[in-house]
Image (tube, grey):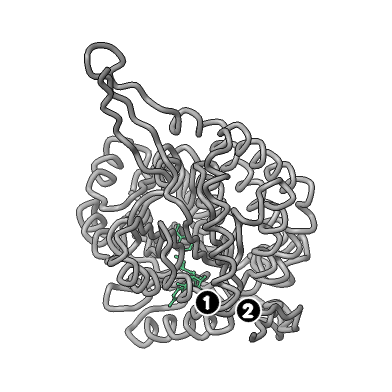
């Protein structure tokens, strides 16, 4: 059994080591889940919901400990870790309050010679292979509705947030979910690969397009649901009729740098109409220069380290590529600690779509701003992407913004806001951003299968 090192990205120090699973332990865990799932599904929905309510309470009770643990292993500022847990609780509350409505049997026709109804049955034993950037939020999107729906869950957190994975597992057990209904797999891609070899009844993945595409190809012959929440290259457009350019710049900057830009729906490229371009660039650059980068446990810190060492080199390569092709760095160079995976938030102007920073997912605090003549040019550039997660339009005129939003081939559109997710709305990506939806009614029904009953007599 190999060991996985948990490294603090702010200090580069070893926090602990965790034993990875092996083919034998994965097989044992799978056997447990297969055996336990039918009894879990047979329990009344109210009992399953009561366990989830306990989990919801535990997240609050243990918030300080688990926030610090998350910050220690992935580097997000402590307050953002607390915010993530609060956000995860909000999503769980949505699932608790709305699951009965979407999972109860429905009579389509309850009179006459042939009665007809629909019931919703669990998929069975499902895998959740997950990313590290928002482990609580993306974890609960799958784990909670899957358990409520009567499934057993084989949860594989990212190898970069294993402590959080363990906390989630322990709190799930403490909340009353049996060990033969929830199991965690510890490891990296190889252990994820072991889950792909199992005869599971559904695969729910959050991560990169590259891994997602591989998983989809491996799962396809099994003929079971395979849902993918992948990356994005999300555009934000600032039209020339915005009322308060500083406020728009502030919102856009937050969309770029919150969680150090490591959000699937982070603002990844900005287009600004030429009349307000100079004012916008001036404002966002000035605000960016004030961002405090440093120790994520210090309450004054706004930007912590990147979670992964390689990511700093990747972002530097995007910046070099852009500068080599004629872009200008208008903000960057904020002081950063000598140790740790830190990078100064960087804003580039004079960019175009020949540059990687405008086409490939950055997943960090680096942004290109491109000047556009009008809404048509903005729309055309916003659509020039392989991804389809979100798109944002800032304008004081809803009709004008709506025309652009209607043309976006994305799962989500924003008017005068960005980088947000709501439990009541479906979260879904198109094209290379994914398949299927979590959250909302769609994210409850995703974990069950309908059965049609034709009843005579
Ligand atoms: P990743 O694809 O590297 O890894 C995701 C998970 O897949 C990890 O648990 C990893 O161990 C596992 N994995 C890797 N190789 C595998 C293989 N061959 N077989 C099975 N499992 C394998 O992604 P990441 O770096 O953890 O996450 C960042 C990406 O996730 C970004 O692209 C981001 O945009 C995306 N993301 C999307 C959403 C969304 O809701 N759309 C949310 C969060 C993150």
Q: Quadrant of residue 319?
A: bottom left
Left or right placement of residue 127 versus residue 360 in this view: right
Which structural element holds mark 2? loop
Q: Residue at 46% across / 62% down in the picture? A: 206
SS class, disc 1: helix
Q: Residues within 10 Å of mark 2 (few under 14, many from 20)?
A: some
Give me the disc on residue 191. Answer: 1
| Residue that appears at 36% across and 56% down | 389
Q: Residue 164, image x and y in percent?
A: 67, 63
For the C terminus, which image quadrant? top left
Residue at the extreme front of the image, as rendered: 457
Q: Please name whichever residue, 297 or 338, is drawn nearer the observer in this view of the structure.
A: 297
- The correct choice, above or below, for 433 with respect to 375 in the image is below
- Residue 406 place in picture, x, y as percent: 24, 43
Of residues 235 and 431, which is closer to you in this image? 431
Residue on which the image places disc 2: 20
Residue, x 45% and y 57% (percent of image)? Answer: 265
Taking depth in this image into account, of 133 and 59 the one nearest to the observer is: 59
| Alpha carbon distance from label 1 to label 2 | 8 Å
What's the residue at 38%, 68% (across, down)?
212
Q: Are the two marked residues, 1 and 2, in contact with CB atoms closer than 8 angstroms?
A: yes
Query: Is 230 placed above or below 344 here?
Result: above
Q: Is mark 1 within 8 Å of ligand 1?
A: yes
| Residue closer to the observer: 60 or 9 | 60
Q: Position of residue 55 (x, y in %)?
A: 69, 45
């Amino acid at each position: 059994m190999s060991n996985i090192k948990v490294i603090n990205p702010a200090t580069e120090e070893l926090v602990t080591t965790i034993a990875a699973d092996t083919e034998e332990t994965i097989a044992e865990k799978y056997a447990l889940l297969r055996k336990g799932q039918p009894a879990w599904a047979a329990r009344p929905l109210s009992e399953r919901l009561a366990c989830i309510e306990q989990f919801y309470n535990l997240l609050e009770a243990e918030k300080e400990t688990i926030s610090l643990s998350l910050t220690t292993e992935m580097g997000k500022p402590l307050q953002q870790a607390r915010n993530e847990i609060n956000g995860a609780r909000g999503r769980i509350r949505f699932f608790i309050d709305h699951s009965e409505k979407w999972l109860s049997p429905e009579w389509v026709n309850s009179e006459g010679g042939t009665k007809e109804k629909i019931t919703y049955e669990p998929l069975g034993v499902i895998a959740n292979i997950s990313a590290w950037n928002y482990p609580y939020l993306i974890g609960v999107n799958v784990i909670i509705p899957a358990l409520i729906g009567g499934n057993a869950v084989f949860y594989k957190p990212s190898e970069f947030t294993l402590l959080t994975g363990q906390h989630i597992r322990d709190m799930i057990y403490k909340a009353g979910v049996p060990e033969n209904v929830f199991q965690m797999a510890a490891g990296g891609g190889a252990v994820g690969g072991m889950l792909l070899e199992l005869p599971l009844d559904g695969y729910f993945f959050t991560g990169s397009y590259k891994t997602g595409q591989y998983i989809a190809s491996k799962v396809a012959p099994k003929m079971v649901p395979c849902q993918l929440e992948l990356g994005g290259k999300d555009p934000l457009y600032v039209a020339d009729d915005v009322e308060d350019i500083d406020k728009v710049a502030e919102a856009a900057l937050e969309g770029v740098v919150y969680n150090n830009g490591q959000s699937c729906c982070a603002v990844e490229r900005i287009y600004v109409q030429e009349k307000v371009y100079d004012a916008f660039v001036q404002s966002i650059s000035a605000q960016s220069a004030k961002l405090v980068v440093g120790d994520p446990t210090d309450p004054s810190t706004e930007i912590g380290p990147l979670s992964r060492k390689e990511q700093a080199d990747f972002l530097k390569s995007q910046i070099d590529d852009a500068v080599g092709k004629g872009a200008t760095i208008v903000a960057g160079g904020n002081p950063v600690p000598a140790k740790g995976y830190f990078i100064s938030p960087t804003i580039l102007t004079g960019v175009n779509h020949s540059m990687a920073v405008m086409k490939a997912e950055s997943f960090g605090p680096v942004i290109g701003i491109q000047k556009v003549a009008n809404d048509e040019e903005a729309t055309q550039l916003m659509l020039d992407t392989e991804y389809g997660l979100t798109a944002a339009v800032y304008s004081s005129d809803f009709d004008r913004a709506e025309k652009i939003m209607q043309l976006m081939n994305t799962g989500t559109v924003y008017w005068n806001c960005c980088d947000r997710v709501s439990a009541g709305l479906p979260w879904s990506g198109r094209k290379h951003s994914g398949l299927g939806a979590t959250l909302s009614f769609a994210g409850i029904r995703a974990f069950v299968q309908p059965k049609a009953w034709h009843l005579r007599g």
